[in-house]
Image (tube, helix red, strand yellow):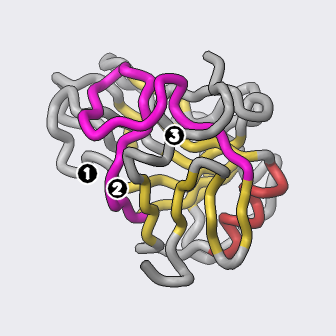
Amino acid sequence: MTASDMVLTPQGLRFAGRLIPCAIGKTGVTARKREGDGATPAGLHRITGLWYRPDRLPRLAPWARPIGPADLWCDAPDDPAYNRHARAPLAASHEKLRRADPLYDLILVTDWNAAGVPGAGSAIFLHQWRRPRFGTEGCIAFARRDLLWLASRAAPGTRLIVRASSLPKYPNPA
């Protein structure tokens, strides 16, 4: 572990000398991630992308990509685009990256299941939370100000360490 690693702890995410409150998957952390299980996957992950809504936020880093109306993320295990960025129109199941709510105004993408193994889980992002400690579908979520701080300091390849013992010491309601 290095000082530049993001480490999920039971108290929050530790990064660059700060401990940041966060929410994890509504069913906790798992070593056996499956599509739709509501769990955050344990393991060593890397930050591979940064997406932002240019109509709502400034570009926080040179490597950030703008989210447009046609940007999607495929979550259909039987589709060749599974767990990858896609563009509309897409007949397969997907998430819209440009949402009406602010949850995906800023997204740090992880390399979870980068090979696209069918059913192993997709779209594990760091994004804004719905409300404090509200469980996610598997992502790690933060208050907007904390997410902005993270995104301005993370770089491609930043390590994210999630241990199975990273269960929070607070209830994580769905």
Circle 3 is placed at which residue position?
A: 167
- Front residue of 29/113: it is 29
- Give the image quarter of residue 78: top left
Residue drawn where x is 43% and y is 69% of the image: 159
Identified by mark 2, the residue type is: Asp
Residue mark closest to the camera, 1 vs 3: 3
Q: Is residue 94 visible?
A: yes
Q: Height in image: 126 above or below 49?
A: above
Residue drawn where x is 51% and y is 31% of the image: 25
Q: Which secondary structure, mark 2?
A: loop
Magenta span has 162?
Answer: no
- Front residue of 18/157: it is 18
Circle 1 is placed at which residue position?
A: 114
- Front residue of 144/40: it is 40
Magenta span has 31?
Answer: yes
Identified by mark 3, the residue type is: Leu
Identified by mark 1, the residue type is: Ala
